[in-house]
Amino acid sequence: MPDDDQQPGGDRAADEPGQLVSGASLIRIVLVDDQELVRTGFRMVLDAQPDMQVVGEAGDGLDALDLARRVHADVMVMDARMPRLDGVEATRQIRQAGDRPRVLMLTTFDLDEYAFAALKAGASGFLLKDVPPDELLFAIRAVHSGDSVVAPSTTRRLIDQFASMLPGGELEAPDELADLTDREREVLTLLAQGLSNSEIATRLFVSEATVKTHVGRVLAKLSLRDRVQAVVFAYEYGLVRAGQRQDQD
């Protein structure tokens, strides 16, 4: 592993590019947290994985922006609350600059107010800071592959917790919304209510594969990255409103 260059403000960056391990591409990771002890713990876990390498560390959002420009990374594990620039605003700026790195947001409290803001800013998901190591590793690999780490059940809880904070149709619907078929719009509405693909399939009397196809088309037509952003979109443009739930136990 290459020597690290120590920069002010807790900014550390590895200079050498990632290499292949057992024929698989190395997942290059940047850790962003204002607590050095937390970063050290995460680094020990991640660097022990054959398919992962920590290529940089930052102690706040500003240093994270600098690292994102200087270091090629696939995933940035970002704390939500930090001095100078918090993780939400750092995520927004990083995501506006390009597809990589994808951001996995860490929160201290389950579903705190940063969670919704982070997902809206472009984070690919969020976890608690005390998450078990195996869940952190799974999440990083999922984010790297382009998936969201917010499970449907967590999406339901997110909606329940933050329903009163969601915009609820205050924005003018974009032209792309008219490109959706009636079925695709129906799938989007159910997805936004937190239903999984299998639950949507049961509701619509179609196969799960068909639902997956519809979800993919919805994301493509609306230029959305994942189902989490689809939830945000549906609330912003009034397809679903707080308290509206069609799923029944």
Image (cartoon, grey):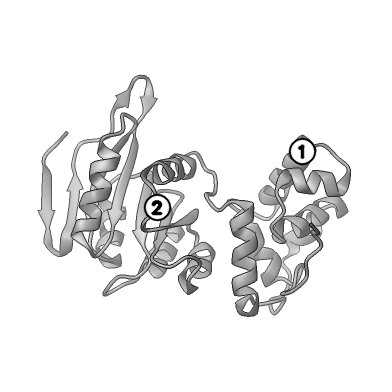
x then y, percent, for residue 36: 19, 59
Instruction: Determine whether 21 is above or below 97 in the image.
Output: above
- Which quadrant of the figure contains the N terminus? top left
Q: Earlier in the sequence, mark 1 or mark 2?
A: 2
Task: Name the kind of residue labelled 2 in the image.
Answer: Val
Which SS class for mark 2? Answer: loop
Q: Is residue 142 left or right of residue 27?
A: right
Residue 208 is tagged as 1
The three-letter code of the residue at mark 1 reads: Glu
Report the residue that reaches farthest toward the top: 22
Query: Is residue 222 or residue 140 the one in the foreground?
Result: 140
In the depicted structure, whether residue 91 falls above or below residue 135: below
Assess disc 1: are there few (<14), some (14-19) or many (≥20) residues with their C-alpha within 10 Å of its C-alpha: some
Q: Name the one closer to the observer, 133 or 181.
A: 133
Q: Quadrant of residue 20?
A: top left
Label 2: few (<14), some (14–19) or many (≥20) C-alpha neighbours in 10 Å: few
Q: Percent position (x, y) of residue 71?
A: 27, 47
Residue occupying the point 27% across, 61% down:
33
Whole-number angstrom distance, CA of label 1 to CA of label 2: 30 Å
* Residue at position x 77%, y 42% in the image: 211
Query: Which residue is identified by label 2?
Result: 131
- Residue at 68%, 55% (x, y): give it: 222
